Image (spheres, rainbow, N blue to C red):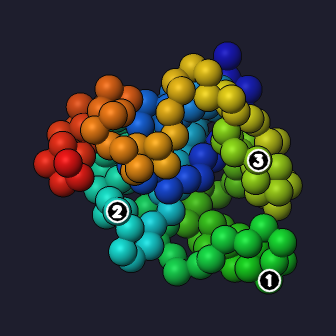
Amino acid sequence: MTEYATGLIVGRFNPPHLGHSYMIEWAAQRCARLVVFVNTREGELVPGELRAAWLAELHPDVTVVEVRHDLDTNFDDEALWARWMDLFHASWPHDDGPAAVFSSDPYIGDLARRFDADAVVVDAERIAVPISATQIREDPADHLDRLAPNVRHWVEHHLL
């Protein structure tokens, strides 16, 4: 089923949940090599290195890279996009760039175009695993069943 030599998923994963795992596994089935960028910055709810470690533990067959930054997000700002792309290119662990960029979010087309890659939308309606990290951050106790055991344990001890 491999369709792409390399693939990329970019996200905050704050915290990672089973919907993220669904997307990573779905994309990994379609790529010879999948890279997951975990965007992190100071002061976030869950430390970035922990989020990256969780994803690496959950998905040992993909390359997880913590991408530390202090950049804003403004999809209308070309200069800011250039800074993001410089950061992403510097963080990319392979000689060839991604052939596909996977996401369930609408920005994926712009990001894929900047990589000269295919944009592949995965479960945009979140039907397979109906959850978002925003929902978890807003009410962690109500969504523990949507977290992997390693993440659930941390959330139970740090957010409840």
Q: Residue at x 81, y 77 (%)?
A: 77
For the residues labelled 1 and 2, the Cα–Cα distance comes to: 28 Å
Observer-side mark, 1 or 3, equals: 3
Instruction: Give how far across and how far down residue 11 sits, in percent.
Output: 55, 53
Furthest-top residue in this view = 1
Q: Residue at x 33, y 34 (%)?
A: 142
Q: Earlier in the sequence, mark 1 or mark 3?
A: 1
Instruction: Say which of 5 and 149 sits in front.
Output: 149
Which amino acid is tagged 3? Pro
Instruction: Give how far across and how far down residue 124 sits, in percent.
Output: 70, 33
Which amino acid is tagged 2? Leu
Instruction: Give how far across and how far down residue 125 sits, in percent.
Output: 68, 29
Could you classify mark 1 by the number of other residues whose Cα lies within 10 Å: few (under 14), some (14-19), or many (20 or more)?
few
Q: Residue at x 31, y 51 (%)?
A: 53
The N terminus is located in which quarter? Answer: top right
Observer-side mark, 1 or 2, equals: 2
For the residues labelled 3 and 2, the Cα–Cα distance comes to: 24 Å
Q: Is residue 84 above or below residue 92?
A: below
Instruction: Say which of 3 and 58 sits in front.
Output: 58
Q: Is residue 72 left or right of residue 49?
A: right
Residue wearing tag 3? 106
Residue wearing tag 2? 45
Residue wearing tag 1? 79
Tag 1 near tag 3, CB within 8 Å: no
Question: Can residue 160 be seen here?
Answer: yes
Label 1: which secondary element = helix
